[in-house]
Image: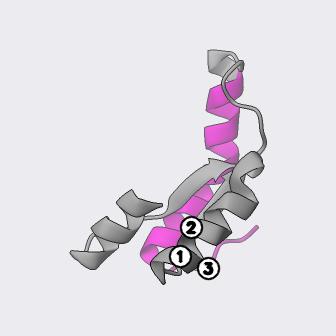
Amino acid sequence: MHDIVNLEAVGVAGVFLASTEFIDAAAAQARALGADPAVIFVPHPIQDRTDDEMRALADSAIEDIVASITGADSER
């Protein structure tokens, strides 16, 4: 959360991406930092996924990530 807040502070567009395990923690951290970054969550867990599963997670999130960064509406 700190990284995306710091990047946005210097004008770099970005999105906070984490697994669903961190929904509550991310919200608490954003509140503590006084930030409201774009946030996307993917299914948890990720640490034991295969390369193919990780690619599938990335594929499922990429449209939302690009839309969030560019301000475009996602079709999801």
Question: In this picture, is 52 found above or below 8?
Answer: above
Which residue occupies the foreground of this view, 1 or 46?
1
Q: Secondary structure at mark 3?
A: loop
Residue at 45%, 70% in the rendered image? 69
Residue 28 in picture, x, y percent from top left: 64, 70
59 over 7 or under it: above or below:
above
Report if residue 19 is visible in the image: yes
Does residue 70 belong to the magenta stretch?
yes
> Which class describes the residues within 10 Å of circle 3: few (<14), some (14-19), or many (20+)?
few
| Residue under the image location 67 percent in, 59 percent down | 25
Q: Which residue is mark 2?
A: 29
Dot 2 amino acid type: Gln
Task: Say which residue label 3 marks.
Answer: 73
Task: Name the quarter where the C terminus is drawn.
Answer: bottom right
Q: Closer to us: mark 1 or mark 3?
A: 1
- Specify start and end residues of the magenta stretch as a single range: 53-76
Which residue lies under the disc numbered 1? 32
Q: State the mark number for residue 2.
A: none
Q: Mark 3 belongs to which amino acid?
A: Asp
Q: Is residue 15 left or right of residue 22?
A: left
Question: Circles 1 and 2: CB distance less than 8 Å?
Answer: yes
